[in-house]
Image: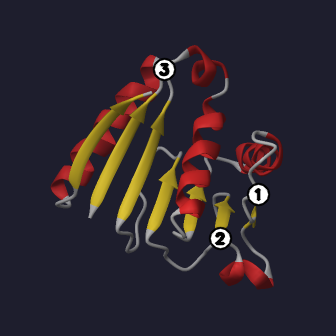
Amino acid sequence: MRADFYLIDKPRFREQPLLLVCELAKRAFAAQQPTLILARDHAQAEAIDELLWAFDEDAFIPHQLAGDDDDADTAVLIVPPGVDTPDRPLVINLREGCPGGNCQRVLEVVAADPAERDGSRERWREYQRRGFELHKNDM
């Protein structure tokens, strides 16, 4: 089990942190890893849904908001709070808390905002406690 923290610093991602989420989803899809994106709220889930269509005109990433019959067949599921989905090996987490369930790898996208950084430290300690291998990436 592994958790990677992506700490946003570059202007491109500072202005639009969800771009980094899209880049990570694109990489996961290229690696054929079924992915859950745990959105903080419905508005964020919809913003990610829109951006995944638009951010890279050469990339097609099959994705949808979770809660449909064909969820199991969709490579990238965007999960708003309150929607239950089966576990997947890769989770991109945008929420305050650590994801439950069984995942092999968690990608944490941490905005440049000081409050976000504080929350990420809490999650770092929680993953440590759960025995995850931890990595930090400055983006």
Residue 6 at what x, y percent from top left? 41, 36
Q: 17 or 129: nearer the eye?
A: 17
Mark 3 or 1, nearer chain start: 1
Contact between marks 2 and 3 (CB within 8 A): the answer is no
Q: Is residue 10 left or right of residue 82?
A: left
Which dot, 2 or 1, sits closer to the camera? 1
Q: Is residue 22 visible?
A: yes
Residue, disc 3: 112
The answer to whether residue 97 is above or below residue 34 is above
Residue, disc 2: 75
Q: Quadrant of residue 77?
A: bottom right
Instruction: Identify the residue at image location x=45%, y=27%.
Output: 139
Rendered image: mark on residue 60: 1
- Label 1 environment density (alpha carbons within 10 Å; few <14, some 14–19, many ≥20): few
Which dot, 2 or 3, sits closer to the camera? 2
Instruction: Identify the residue at image location x=22%, y=58%.
Output: 132
Instruction: Identify the residue at image location x=67%, y=57%.
Output: 80
The answer to whether residue 133 is above or below residue 34 is above
